[in-house]
Amino acid sequence: MNNKYELIYEGKAKKVFSHQDEDKVIIEFKDDATAFNALKKAKFEGKGKLNCLISARIFEHLKQHNIPTHYLELKNGNTMVAQKIKIIPLEIVLRNIAYGSLCKQTTIESGTVLEKPLIDIYLKNDELNDPLITKDRIQLMKILSSRDLDLIIDLTLKINKILKSFFKDIQLRLVDFKLEFGYDFNKNIVLGDEISPDNCRLWDLNQKNDTIVSLDKDRFRNDLGGLIEAYSEINQRINELI
Ligand code: TMP
Ligand code: ASP
């Protein structure tokens, strides 16, 4: 990245740089992949670019459905311009199908289709290992008002409906996903972060039997191989939608 831009923040999968407009930032998607709070690390050449392109298309789609997002425009390869937001330190996970940590922490069987979407909220704090958090603890920590929390939950449910249908159109089942929200310069709540196979579970519907074929970061988490091939396949299916 050009050194006229100042690095403001570096996360596990992205770097955030200043922009000449003070209310904007440039987000660079990295090729790094981590899992289990960075206990497992690897680099996949081309992942950053694929996630940037996939996220951009999904943000554009959400915008068309009146979901406020931080996304403004694609810049090049693996960077996008976004509104500068103050991230709310919560990770909002929505689950349509039981999988992953839900099945490790409960007796719910893997693959169970949930009667209604389940929302799990985690505190975004690497030192504490992003613990599952309750509404009362969120109030106790004064992270945000209960009105804003309700707003975020409502937005997450709406986003789920839009994304489920978006992914179904490209033969993918949206199992679960993680969202992050923030406040823009006008103190409005907007969707931030990214929406990509790094933070969604997506199963291929183009299978003759019930075998689960993950086209997402589970390929890395579970050592399945073929991560770039899976992300490229998703990008290609999205491009064919136009
Ligand atoms: P989980 O089953 O491990 O709780 O993950 C649920 C969803 O959230 C899955 O789509 C992956 C995503 N996720 C993230 O994006 N970041 C994280 O740190 C974790 C734990 C999960
Ligand atoms: N994003 C988390 C990490 O960096 C975990 C995950 O996505 O599974 O470790």
Image (spheres, rainbow, N blue to C red):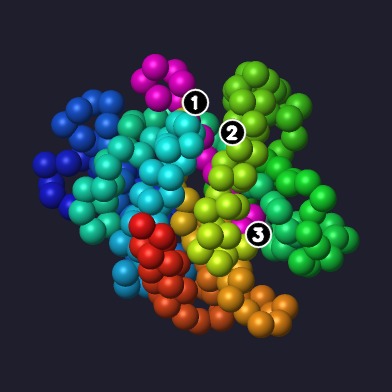
Residue under label 2: 155
Mark 3 lies on residue: 175
Residue 226's place in the image compared with 181, above or below, is below
Name the amino acid type tagged 2: Leu
Q: Residue at x 74, y 46 (%)?
A: 118
Residues 150 and 84: in front is: 150
Q: Quadrant of residue 228?
A: bottom left
Secondary structure type for disc 1: strand
Q: Is 178 one of the magenta-colored residues?
A: yes
Q: Earlier in the sequence, mark 2 or mark 1?
A: 2
Q: What amino acid type should be assigned to the residue bearing mark 1?
A: Ile
Question: Which numbered tag is attached to residue 181?
Answer: none
**Bounds of the magenta segment:** 174-188
Mark yes or no: residue 13 visible: yes
When asked about the image quadrant of residue 49, the answer is bottom left
Q: Position of residue 140 (x, y in %)?
A: 70, 23
Magenta-drawn stretch contains 183: yes
| Distance (Cα) linking label 1 and label 3 | 25 Å
* Ligand 1 within 8 angstroms of badge 3 C-beta: yes
Under circle 3, the secondary element is strand
Residue 2 percent location from the top left of the image: 13, 49
- Contact between labelled residues 1 and 2, with CB atoms less than 8 Å apart: yes
| Disc 1: CA contacts within 10 A as few (<14), some (14-19) or many (>=20) | many
- Indicate left or right for 24 with 212 as reference: left
Number of marks drawn: 3
- Residue placed farthest to the right in the image? 107
| 124 is higher (above) or lower (below) than 66 | below
Question: Which mark identifies residue 189?
Answer: 1
Foreground mark, 2 or 1, reads 2
